[in-house]
Image (tube, grey):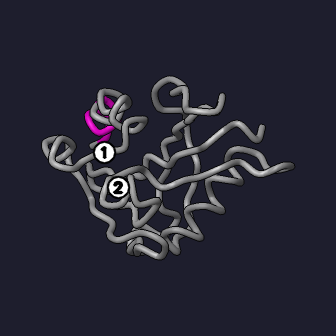
């Protein structure tokens, strides 16, 4: 499991949450979904909930997969899950990142995504299109 990176497609009010990286320097300023590495002994859902707590200071519910696995350098894969806030009024905050931003379907092209997340933009659009 240590080759899996999980990401949260966190949707609220028809918008997807993205966060802006602070590091490493070559990716600083680029945008990605919240998430991170699945540690030894963790399920993917547990790892995603842990990462969202650490990165956004929020509690999430993990739903269905979004899109296909995206191959990453070093034999890793990025795997995205639809997620929602347990308390919809809770506001995610940038704990480890420069900023967070809610993006509607028309805003997805307005930010400089990391390459792996950019591949999944059609899946993100489809996810937003199916939510009221």
Which residue is drawn at the image coordinates 36% and 60% (left, top)? 28
Dot 1 alpha-carbon crowd within 10 angstroms: few under 14, some 14 to 19, many 20 or more: many
Q: Is residue 22 magenta?
A: no
- Left or right of 63? Residue 14 is left
Which residue is drawn at the image coordinates 55% and 26% (left, top)? 71
User: Where residue 45 sits in the image (x, y, percent)?
Assistant: 67, 48
Which residue is drawn at the image coordinates 76% and 46% (left, top)? 43
Label the magenta part by its dominant secondary structure.
helix
Q: Is residue 121 above or below residue 62?
A: above
User: Where residue 80 sits in the image (x, y, percent)?
Assistant: 52, 38
Which residue is drawn at the image coordinates 39% and 50% (left, top)? 32
Q: Name the residue carrying label 2.
A: 18
Residue 53 occupies which quadrant of the picture?
Answer: bottom right
Front-most of 81 and 25? 25
Q: If you read the primary sequence from the N terminus, does the residue marked by circle 1 or circle 2 appear first?
A: 2
Front-most of 63 and 120? 120
Q: Is residue 127 magenta?
A: yes
Q: Is residue 21 above or below residue 92?
A: above
- Report, in whole angstroms, how far the alpha carbon at label 1 lies from the one at label 2: 9 Å
- Left or right of 9? Residue 71 is right
Residue 97 occupies which quadrant of the picture?
Answer: bottom left
Marks 1,2: beta carbons within 8 A: yes
Callout count: 2
Using the image, tell me which numbered label, if any, was put on residue 113.
1
- Span of residues in magenta: 126-131
Dot 2 alpha-carbon crowd within 10 angstroms: few under 14, some 14 to 19, many 20 or more: many
């Amino acid at each position: 499991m240590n080759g899996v990176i999980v990401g949260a497609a966190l949707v609220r009010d028809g918008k997807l949450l993205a966060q802006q990286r602070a590091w490493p320097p070559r990716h600083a300023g680029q945008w990605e979904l919240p998430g991170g590495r699945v540690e030894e002994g963790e399920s993917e859902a547990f790892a995603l909930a842990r990462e969202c707590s650490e990165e956004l200071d929020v509690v999430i519910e993990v739903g269905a997969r979004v899109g296909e696995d995206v191959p990453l350098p070093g034999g890793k894969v990025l795997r995205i899950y639809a997620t929602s806030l347990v308390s919809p009024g809770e506001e995610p905050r940038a704990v480890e990142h420069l900023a967070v931003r809610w993006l509607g379907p028309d805003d997805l092209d307005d930010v400089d995504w990391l390459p792996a997340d950019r591949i999944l933009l059609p899946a993100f659009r489809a996810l937003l299109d199916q939510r009221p």
